[in-house]
Amino acid sequence: MSQTIAERLLRAAADGDRETAAAALAADVHFRGLTPRKTPSADDRDGVLQIMGNWFEHFAGFEAIEDGTVLDRRSIRYRVRVEDPEEGTLVFEQQAYYDADEDTGEITWMHVVCSGMRPLVPAAAPAAA
């Protein structure tokens, strides 16, 4: 099965392949994100690539990728594992909704919601009193 444009974007961003990631985005792409600490936004390709570069800075692998649609709007959900030098292995999950131009195939609109970084091995629960 072939990859969707969103999956190509994600895999390229995670691999640091800026050229392939840029090719998946319209020059004037509308992008908004919601994470536990920030609400990143960009209205151009370079801004989106910067945001995604930060998210995938310590990329270690995808745990899951699932494509879908909501009527005429496309969606992709993905879980990412990162290896942070200070915090160890972390996981985050994002759900994105996006539109792509039918002629160019480029993503023109994308909104992303993020779970935030979660430790792979949760801290031990406090002992009962």
Image: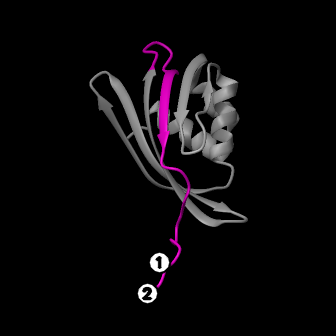
Counting other residues with Cα less than 10 Å from the Cα at mark 1, is it few (<14), some (14-19), or many (20 or more)? few
Query: Image height check: is 32 above or below 118?
Result: above
The magenta segment: 100-127
Q: Which mark is residue 98?
A: none
Residue 27 in which image quadrant: top right
Distance between the Cα atoms at labels 1 and 2? 12 Å
Q: Position of residue 107 (x, y in %)?
A: 51, 23
Q: Which mark is residue 125?
A: 1
Mark 2 element type? loop
- Seen at 49% across and 35% down, the residue is 112
Instruction: Verify whether residue 115 appears in magenta.
Output: yes
Name the quarter where the C terminus is drawn: bottom left
Residue depth check, mark 1 versus mark 2: number of the one nearer the observer: 2
Q: Position of residue 56 (x, y in %)?
A: 63, 47
Comparing 33 with 13, the one in front is: 33
Mark 1 element type? loop
Comparing 119 with 96, the one in front is: 119
- Seen at 47% across and 78% down, the residue is 125
Label 2, on which residue? Answer: 129
Q: In the rendered structure, which amino acid carries the disc numbered 2?
A: Ala
